Amino acid sequence: MQTLPDASCDLIYADPPFNQNRRMGPTQKGDTSFDDRFVGGLDGYVSFLRPRLCEMRRLLSERGSLFVHLNWRAVHYVKIELDRIFGVDNFLNEIIWGYRSGSRPGRWFSRKHDTILVYAKSLGNHTFNVLREGEYRTRDLKRSADGVPYKETRKGPIFFHPNGPAMTDVWNVPILSTVSRERTGYPTQKPEALLRRIVLACSNEGDTVADFFCGSGTMLVVAQELGRKWIGCDESAEAVAIASARVTAARESRQRA
Ligand SMILES: C[S@@+](CC[C@H](N)C(=O)[O-])C[C@H]1O[C@@H](n2cnc3c(N)ncnc32)[C@H](O)[C@@H]1O
């Protein structure tokens, strides 16, 4: 990050280790494991992230935003750091990514969500494209001749957006199944569908998307497929090899299409 000029990225996604105090992986496909342990526990973890988050802020362009992917162990501590680094006024969202995966009943509710914190470099100047999903809850919607949904009321018709309600900050996206075609074998690999939302909402074609904890390269593949430029790195040589192979395959399939 230190070698890159100021304001060279329009969107940054950070999916750092979560401070789970263990080694993640390896899987059957080779040693793709990485360490998720920090000397000094939570304080050590936050001290590790702080300078990196500061660099990410420096690298964002005026219209840029940062998405930091965390879980229940770390999110509250990192939120306070991010408020200090970006300013509370530049906080945009706390996205709840809910996924259902197998769970056993225990002594508390199954923990089945991650949290993604979102900050603008400069609120108001940031890129934000409204995404839509799902059905309206309003009953008895009719459709106009050109397909626009509306509701008859005593004061006249109320029209709704034809592509459905605006997406909220609660996202239900399935976790990668063990037999998913996307699966590379890299531990903690995220689904492309999740990252696609981030890229579509907060960048435009030709923008530069960066992921400095890129792991298996999910964000790089999504950015490439959506016509964005991208920058990625990871401290693990194995991760970089998997990510390179993935983006090369994605580029070749785009060229064939
Ligand atoms: C949660 S994983 C990222 C998974 C990725 N989003 C994907 O979809 O495959 C976190 C990554 O951070 C990397 N990492 C840990 N410490 C790092 C550091 N200091 N610099 C760069 N990468 C680091 C690990 O090697 C690991 O690949």
Image (spheres, rainbow, N blue to C red):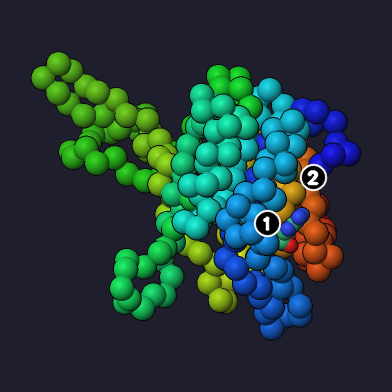
Mark 2, other Cα within 10 Å: few <14 / some 14–19 / many ≥20: some
Relative side of 177 to 51, left or right:
left
Image point 65% across, 65% down: which residue?
A: 37
In the rendered view, would you say 248 is above or below 102?
above
Please give the name of the residue rendered at 71% of the width and 73% of the height, measured from the top-left corner.
33
Quarter containing ligand 1?
bottom right
* Element at label 2: strand
Residue located 48% across and 47% down the image: 76
> Disc 1 versus disc 2: distance between alpha carbons?
12 Å
Say whether mark 1 is within 8 Å of ligand 1. Answer: yes
Res. 104 mark: none
The residue under label 1 is 218
Picture coordinates of residue 246, whole percent (x, y): 76, 62
Give residue 231's mark.
Answer: 2
Three-letter code, disc 2 = Ile
Q: Which residue type carries mark 1?
A: Thr
